[in-house]
Image (cartoon, grey):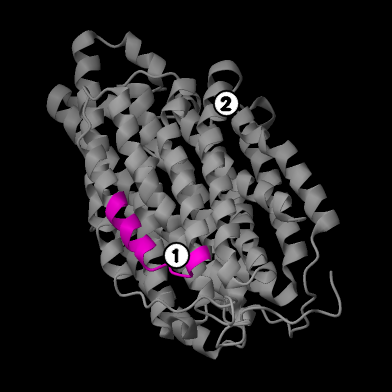
Amino acid sequence: MVVLPGLMLAMVLAMLDNMIVGTAMPRIVGELGGISHLSWVVTAYVLGTTVSTPIWGKIGDLYGRKNIFLISIVIFMVGSALCGMAGSEPLGGPEGGMTQLIAFRAFQGLGAGGLMVNAMAIIGDLVPPRERGQYQGLMAGVMSLSMIAGPLVGGFITDHLDWRWAFYVNLPIGFVALALLAARLKLPRLRTEHRIDWLGATLLSIGITALVLITTWGGNEYDWTSPQILGLAGLAVATLALFVPVERRAAEPILPLGLFANRNFTLISLIGFLLGFAMFGAINFLPLFQQIVQGASATDSGLLMLPMMGAAMVISLFVGRAITTTGKYKTYPIAGGVVMAIGMWLLSLMDVTTPSWQTGVFIAVLGAGMGFLMQTTMLIAQNSVEQKDLGVASSTSTFFRSIGGSFGVSLFGAVFNNQLTDGMTARFGAEGEKLASGGGQFDPAALEELPAPVKSGFLEVLAASIADVFWWAILFAVVVPLLAAFVKEIPLRGGPGQGDGPDAEAAPPVPAALD
């Protein structure tokens, strides 16, 4: 409880930033570039998080999590400051500002990967699995609060300040988190032989980046049979094929393949992938629908996200308490997958006539599904491994959720752009294609300058394109409960009368030295 506030603030940094930026995104692309760049600003951040997550988890296991955690906070803060400066006069002005923002978001994502995985791993260091549900429930509640506050803060900043403060707001929170954790966090000082699997990390990063670029560019920037896409596909296959034997021979593999011999760990990793795919890929487009189709201000768009975040927070806290009380967890990921799929289906029904209150009901259902899943997946992953592998298990679980988000954002972004371009071209010819691709600067205010028939047609096509994104998300969401049904319910270690449980590895021995 002494260090929990610092850990919560670190989680706030990562979650608050994502939601603030989502609300501010229409204004950002309006100043720095076209609407077709929207998915890239998110993709770069999620990709940076994805490729760095397993590295942060491993070096935390090897060198001790405290200093590594603090370093990740510093990297995140530097990235936030750079994002706020993108396209400003000191960096050359608006021309090239979108490219700068995408690059800085990737750097910011490198730090965010360390925030997410190490915060969860530190909880795992301090609390046995049976009691961990309520603490991770608190963390999930804070994440949900951040997701509630993010759109509100982002909307206020966008309407009353400059969008750059969507990034600058991270700096004071980061300084407070650094001060609390540097002074209060005491963890076991690990003594291990330090061997970082840099070759494996490099191969994994290249392979994942190539796959994300394929899903982003394929059928959009380049034809699926173009040399660029085929070259990326060859690069992905080659690097990931090399990754497997490298990991088998590595003394300290960045992604221990032996973990996947555990059925629960494999299943929950796949569930995390699908959760990230559907969740991050789809909800990225909600602020766009609310602000452009429904005509909400940025602040109102933040308020309209409250039902989803509130439902996720309430369900997360309920699930955490229930797991701690009963020691049972299998039913929650099954229920979460079903409810999330229903939420995606409801959102796929939206069109230009859908009122805001109805959207609020739909996203509340989606939020309830997320609440069942978010912290339960991490708990099951951690309970499936030995204590010495806790960090890498946490990072692997987070990695699969992040990589799902990377693919989801890029694939759904490509679906959205293709549907929007095709729909506008069919209605208005070359001029419609130019508008759909973000020719010139585009933001909600630009709609008022369009002729009434063009504006009406654009809104209808835009709403249909976003609905198509949610239709695609259903295909991935429905697999979650099917996989969760095969999870074996293993007693949580650290429960009453168990000590540390039958495996005797849930809690570390009391250390002689603390860092």
Work out how far the residue at label 1 is from the one at label 2, CA to CA, in angstroms. 31 Å
| Secondary element at image label 1 | helix
Mark 2 surroundings: few (<14), some (14-19) or many (≥20) residues within 10 A: many
Question: What is the three-letter code of the residue carrying label 2?
Answer: Trp
Whether residues under marks 1 and 2 lie with C-beta atoms below 8 angstroms apart, the answer is no
Asked whether, in this view, residue 289 is left or right of residue 120, the answer is left
Viewer-proximal residue among 494 and 420: 494
Residue 145 placement (x, y as % from top left): 55, 40
Front in this rendered view, residue 192 or 145: 145
Foreground tag (1 vs 2): 1
Is tag 1's residue or tag 2's residue first in the polypeptide sequence? 2
Residue 418 screen position, x and y as percent:
24, 40
Location of the C terminus by quadrant is bottom right
Q: Which residue is mark 2?
A: 163
Q: Which residues are magenta?
A: 325-340
Asked whether 84 falls inside the magenta stretch, the response is no
Q: Quadrant of residue 129?
A: bottom right
User: Looking at the image, which residue sits at the far bottom?
Assistant: 249
In the rendered view, would you say 345 is above or below 87?
Answer: below
Image point (77%, 63%), residue name: 67
Going by the image, does 351 lie left or right of 186?
left
88 vs 296: above or below:
below
In the rendered structure, the answer to whether residue 356 lies left or right of residue 349 reads: right
**Residue name at image x 32 percent, y 62 percent:** 334
Mark 1: which amino acid?
Phe
Label 2 secondary element: loop
Report the residue at 42% width, 86% height from top. 261
Crowd around label 1: few <14 · some 14–19 · many ≥20 (10 Å): many
Q: Which residue is the site of mark 1?
A: 400
